Amino acid sequence: MTTLTIMPSATSVAVSEGDSLLAAMLANGAAVAHKCDGQASCGQCHLFVLDGRKGLSRSTREENAILDTMVGVSSKSRLACQCTILGTEDVTVEVLSFV
């Protein structure tokens, strides 16, 4: 099991390898905006990966295309709907309030 820490609430939960980051966060009560049902078309689930980037799947062209159209993107940016937990290391993410 991987530990997922969700900031700014500092909530830590156990998640399984293969889980979608968005699904894991929603299943554990995190308030994550989303409206495209995980299709990488709305960008609302934009968050920052603060720690454990190697514990998540690599970003895809589709994800990068959406991030390229958004304001406030950094090298830590990911779309929660496009990340899969790899189970190799613990992950810390920050849910963004400006999305």
Image (tube, rainbow, N blue to C red):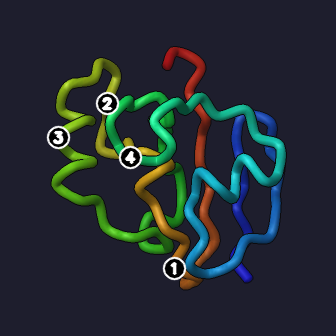
Residue type at mark 2? Val
Query: Callout 2 environment at 10 Å: few (<14), some (14 to 19), or many (20+)?
Result: some
Residue 26 location in percent, x, y?
72, 47
Question: What is the number of the mark on residue 65?
Answer: 3
Residue type at mark 3? Ala
Residue 17 location in percent, x, y?
61, 81
Residue under label 2:
73
Cβ–Cβ under 8 Å for marks 3 and 1: no
> Quick one: quadrant of the N terminus?
bottom right
Residue under label 4:
39
Residue under label 1:
86
Residue 40 location in percent, x, y?
35, 43
**Residue 60 vertical placement versus 26 (above, below):** below
Q: Residue at x 20, y 25 (%)?
A: 69
Foreground tag (3 vs 2): 3
Q: Residue at x 48, y 50 (%)?
A: 81
